[in-house]
Image (tube, grey):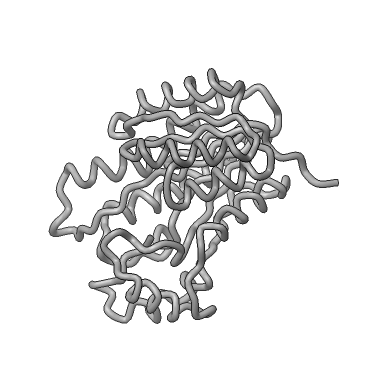
């Protein structure tokens, strides 16, 4: 018998890119969805309209994760008020700014840790507090560079490394009521400052010799939701890129930007 899917979900960063693909896949499977956005109001409205055509309840909620604790608490409360008790949280929202040890500023450091690490932590805390079911999941969108660091994006990489540790820690703290897992994407979407040619070249260097697509991550979310004996896992959807990063980044001080 298939494992039952959640009834209601909150997807942070759900208006655009990978978050949008996840939200739409959840809706296709009958799950009511709240999408969070920060600066993508127009995209959020477009995604919201598409979600509703799939026959589910959907709402778009703004929140600024530069104030992560307050934003997390209000976002969970507003999503719950709109859809009822939540039983899935997908932490997809993130920022990605290039900087080395030499060029990282305190502001750059704080932005990455607030948005990429602190917000998921306090969102998970608020999510667990409102939970009214014994079957719930948190899925964090991490990065394989958190386990196999590549120079060039110091604060981002450190925040994602900590998010991997957070995933494994909270899987232990929140079991058995809540399963906590992570998905580490590879070459899925180019960063805004990456050309399509450079991005395709990056994909050509992984063992599968190609780039992926957002639907690969959305399908991974469904796999984790339907795998009730999996928690604390980091599922790599990279085409094998994480297995030998030196091969894919021959100049390690000037890597191709991730998505």
Q: Position of residue 205 (x, y in %)?
A: 43, 80
Q: Quadrant of residue 257?
A: bottom left
Residue placed furthest toward the right: 1
Residue at figure coordinates x 65%, y 35% from the top left: 55
Is 34 situated above or below 211? Answer: above
**Exactly how many numbered labels are in the figure?**
0
Q: Is residue 201 left or right of residue 102?
A: right
Is 254 situated above or below 77? Answer: below
Is 84 situated above or below 223? Answer: above
Quadrant (top left, top right, bottom left, bottom right) of the C terminus: bottom left
Is 235 situated above or below 212? Answer: above
Residue at figure coordinates x 61%, y 55% from the top left: 220
Q: Is residue 77 left or right of residue 227?
A: left
Q: Position of residue 178 (x, y in %)?
A: 63, 35
Residue at figure coordinates x 46%, y 63% from the top left: 188
Residue at figure coordinates x 67%, y 36% from the top left: 6
Q: Is residue 91 left or right of residue 56?
A: left
| Residue toward you, 192 or 143 | 192
Q: Quadrant of residue 101?
A: bottom left
Q: Position of residue 167 (x, y in %)?
A: 51, 45
Q: Position of residue 10 (x, y in %)?
A: 53, 34
| Residue toward you, 201 or 117 | 201
């Amino acid at each position: 018998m298939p494992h039952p899917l959640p009834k209601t979900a909150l997807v942070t960063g759900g208006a655009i890119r990978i978050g949008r693909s996840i939200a739409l896949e959840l809706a296709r499977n009958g799950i009511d969805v709240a999408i969070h956005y920060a600066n993508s109001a127009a995209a959020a409205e477009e995604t919201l309209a598409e979600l509703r055509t799939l026959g589910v309840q959907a709402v778009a909620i703004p929140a600024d994760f530069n104030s992560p604790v307050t934003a997390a608490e209000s976002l969970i409360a507003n999503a719950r008020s709109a859809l009822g008790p939540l039983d899935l949280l997908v932490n997809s929202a993130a920022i990605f700014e290039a900087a080395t040890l030499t060029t990282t500023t305190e502001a750059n450091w704080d932005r990455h840790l607030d948005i990429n690490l602190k917000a998921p932590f306090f969102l998970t805390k608020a999510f667990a507090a409102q939970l009214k079911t014994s079957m719930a999941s948190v899925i964090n969108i991490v990065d394989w560079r958190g386990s196999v660091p590549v120079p060039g994006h110091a604060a981002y990489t450190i925040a994602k490394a900590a998010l991997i540790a957070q995933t494994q820690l909270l899987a232990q703290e929140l079991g058995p009521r809540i399963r906590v897992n992570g998905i580490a994407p590879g070459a899925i979407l180019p960063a805004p400052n990456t050309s399509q040619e450079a991005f395709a070249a990056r994909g050509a260097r992984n063992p599968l010799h190609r780039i992926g697509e957002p639907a690969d991550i959305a399908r991974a979310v469904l796999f984790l939701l339907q795998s009730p004996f999996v928690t604390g896992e980091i599922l790599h959807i990279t085409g094998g890129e994480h297995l030998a990063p030196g091969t894919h980044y021959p100049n390690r001080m000037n890597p191709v930007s991730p998505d």
